[in-house]
Amino acid sequence: MDKIKERMNALRVEADEAHDQVEDLKAKVKTLEQENLAKEQEITSLNHRNQLLEEEVEKLEASVKDAKDAANQSAQHDTQNEALQRRVQLLEEEAEENDKTLRETNEKLRQTDVKAGHYERKVQALETERDQWESKYEEMAKKHAELEKDLHDLEVSISNV
């Protein structure tokens, strides 16, 4: 009789621990889902920024081309030519800087995609683990109910004796 009570208490403790662990895993899943959402938003933001930078690079390249064309056409005007050359140089530097920023943004985007994939796999693994714990919890609850029924039957048979 005492062994059954000890076993029932042990099963209760184990069921409580399993329940606590399920709650912890649910909290982890929720946190990871929030992190995943934040990463997806960051990806969207970086994609938009990437697109804007590409458009700006195209505009700057067009400006550089226009400035170079203007410099070639006005070769006879030294003062104007010098000013245009300075502008071309500034635009080229700006284009290089924007190109560098674009490469960095693309690298960040790639890294974010890798992280997002990692977090998605982690969320899937945690969900699988959570499902296993829930299944184990349900199995333990079923065993607990069976043991309580057996205990009740035992008590009834003892009281009949």
Image (spheres, rainbow, N blue to C red):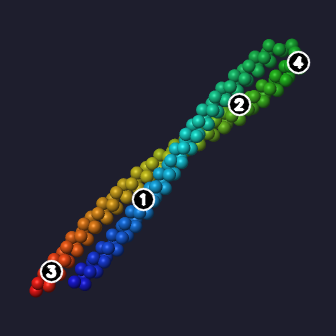
Picture coordinates of residue 8, whole percent (x, y): 27, 76
* Amino acid found under the numbered disc labelled 1: Lys
> Which of the two discs, 1 and 3, sits closer to the camera?
3
> Which image quadrant is residue 15 in?
bottom left
Residue 49 relative to residue 23: left or right? right
Q: Determine which residue is flagged by label 3.
A: 156
Q: Is residue 81 above or below residue 135?
A: above
The circle drawn on residue 95 is 2
**Mark earlier in primary sequence (1, 4):** 1
Q: Nearer the viewer, mark 3 or mark 4?
A: 3
Residue type of the residue flagged with mark 3: Val
| Residue at the image position 70 percent from the left and 32 percent from the top | 96
Is disc 2 surrounded by few (<14), some (14 to 19) or many (20+) residues within 10 Å?
many
Q: Secondary structure at mark 4?
A: helix
Residue drawn at 59 percent across, 36 percent down: 48
Check disc 3 and report its element: helix, strand or loop.
Answer: helix
The residue at the far left in this view is 161
- Please name the amino acid that badge 2 sits on: Ala
- Horizontal and vertical percent for residue 105? 61, 39
Q: Could you tell me how far apart the alpha carbons at marks 2 and 1 are, in whole angstroms?
A: 48 Å
Q: Which residue is mark 1?
A: 26
Q: Residues within 10 Å of mark 1 (few under 14, many from 20)?
A: some
Question: For this view, does 142 lie left or right of residue 37?
Answer: left
**Quadrant location, the C terminus:** bottom left
**Which quadrant is home to the N terminus?**
bottom left
Q: Amino acid at mark 4?
A: Asp
